[in-house]
Amino acid sequence: MHSLTMLGWDVREAPNETPADYRAGPEPWPHSALADDAPLSARIALEISRSLHAALTEAGLTDRGLAERGDLSHTSVGRILRGEGMPDFRTLLLMEAALQRSLWPAELHKVLGEAVEEGLPPGAYPRDREPAEPGRPVTTPKTRAVLRLWATGKSHAEIAEELEIATRTVGKRLASVYEALDIPPGEAFALGVWWATSHENRME
């Protein structure tokens, strides 16, 4: 498994454990501290939730008000506020656009640094998943083209249209990266962190 312990917690899903389940102490989410074994995604979910609470207070908006302004689901906004899920890229971008402020942790690099275990840096290959040949990436140029669009929050259909390929091909190329990195299918957040910090995203 990847040494960065991350769970998907997409707000559209219903996970058994949520970021808020890792609270330590009596304080309510998002004012609480986190347990020492909280995964990276819980730490980032906490920071996003805190930023979102502050932004809504400053703007005088409720979760429903933000949902209407940003063409979002108020259920998803509420789950993020309560620590029940992580926003997908599209939801995060729409919330930031509606509020005209960043919600992503500005010091993410520090959060990542604290979460690295056993010396594996973000963006590195998981143990036993090194490319078969030195210097050979786990992604191909075509897969990297898909990843670059995927990282902007585009849907599989939008990526397929822009690259003039089949939608199922987009899914297959992303699935190949999940498999190569031993990231469970659907844990988009883990894949997003790897791609954002990997040297492969700077390759043609």
Image (spheres, rainbow, N blue to C red):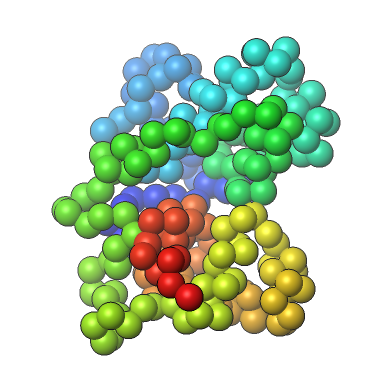
Asked where in the image residue 135 lies, by quadrant, the reply is bottom left
Q: Is residue 4 left or right of residue 172?
A: left
Residue 111, position as x, y percentages in the image: 34, 38
Q: Is residue 101 left or right of residue 62?
A: left
Q: Residue at x 31, y 37 (%)?
A: 110
Q: What residue appears at the point 39 percent right and 14 percent down from the top-left corner?
A: 26
The quadrant of the rendering that contains the N terminus is bottom left
Q: Is residue 178 above or below residue 164?
A: above
The residue nearer to you, when weighing 20 against 94, is 94
- Where is residue 13 shown, x and y percent of the image? 62, 49
Q: In the displayed structure, would residue 201 be above or below residue 170?
A: above
- The residue most toward the bottom is 133
Is 101 situated above or below 182? Answer: above
160 left or right, relative to 200: right
Give the total number of marks visible in the rendering.
0
Q: At 70% across and 16% down in the image, what residue appears?
A: 59
Q: Is residue 154 visible?
A: yes
